[in-house]
Image (cartoon, rainbow, N blue to C red):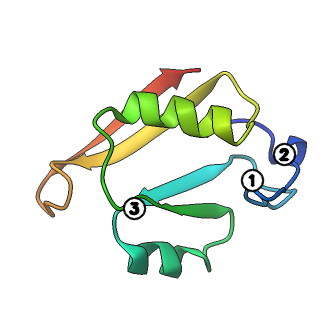
Amino acid sequence: MADSCSAVQPGPDRPSYPSSCPLQMIAISTRAKTCQDLWFSYGVTPAYEPVPPLSWNAYAKDWVRRHELPGDFAILTHRHPAGDPAGDHRMEIINL
């Protein structure tokens, strides 16, 4: 998610972001082990989602709204089809 990290204050429903990171990176995974490993990645907030959403655009917009993140857009990246090592990587700009 793109915008200044310093504008986000941590809370019970909001992750804490390092004050010096240029972007807020949310890594959503259906694998708990991946999320656990990402806790040690600076500037990345893992989010466990056991079932992939039907619409990633709607999910991203809702996630940003629920966590009260600032910004006008998000950049969505993922592999399609999910879980296929030979799948294509996709990047999409989502207007919030």
- Which secondary structure lies at badge 1? loop
Q: Quadrant of residue 66?
A: top right
Q: In the rendering, which numbered label is found on residue 29?
A: 3
- Mark with earlier residue (2, 3): 2
Identify the residue at horizontal 60%, vertical 76% (top origin): 39
In contact (CB < 8 Å): disc 2 and disc 3: no
Which SS class for mark 3? strand
* Amino acid type at image mark 2: Val
Q: Give residue 33's quadrant in the image.
A: bottom left
Q: Nearer the viewer, mark 2 or mark 1?
A: 1
Residue 54 drawn above or below residue 16: above
Q: What's the distance in space between the residues labelled 2 and 3, CA to CA?
A: 22 Å
Q: CA distance from mark 1 to mark 3?
A: 18 Å
Q: Earlier in the sequence, mark 1 or mark 3?
A: 1
Q: Which residue is mark 2?
A: 8
Q: CA distance from mark 2 to mark 1?
A: 8 Å
34 horizontally vs 39: left or right: left
Q: Is residue 33 above or below residue 73?
A: below
- Say few, some or many: other residues with alpha carbon within 10 Å of mark 1 (under 14 / 14 to 19 / 20 or more): few
Location of residue 85 in the rendering, given as x and y in whole percent from the top left corner: 15, 64
Q: Amino acid at mark 3?
A: Ser
Crowd band around label 2 with a 10 angstrom C-alpha radius: few (<14), some (14–19), many (20+): some
Name the quadrant of the N terminus: top right
Name the image quarter holding residue 40: bottom right
Q: Is residue 17 left or right of residue 93?
A: right
Does 24 sit left or right of 35 as displayed?
right
Read off the residue under disc 1. Answer: 14
User: In the displayed structure, would residue 83 be above or below residue 25?
Assistant: below
Residue shown at 67%/48% (left/top)?
24
Q: In this picture, is 87 found above or below 57?
A: below
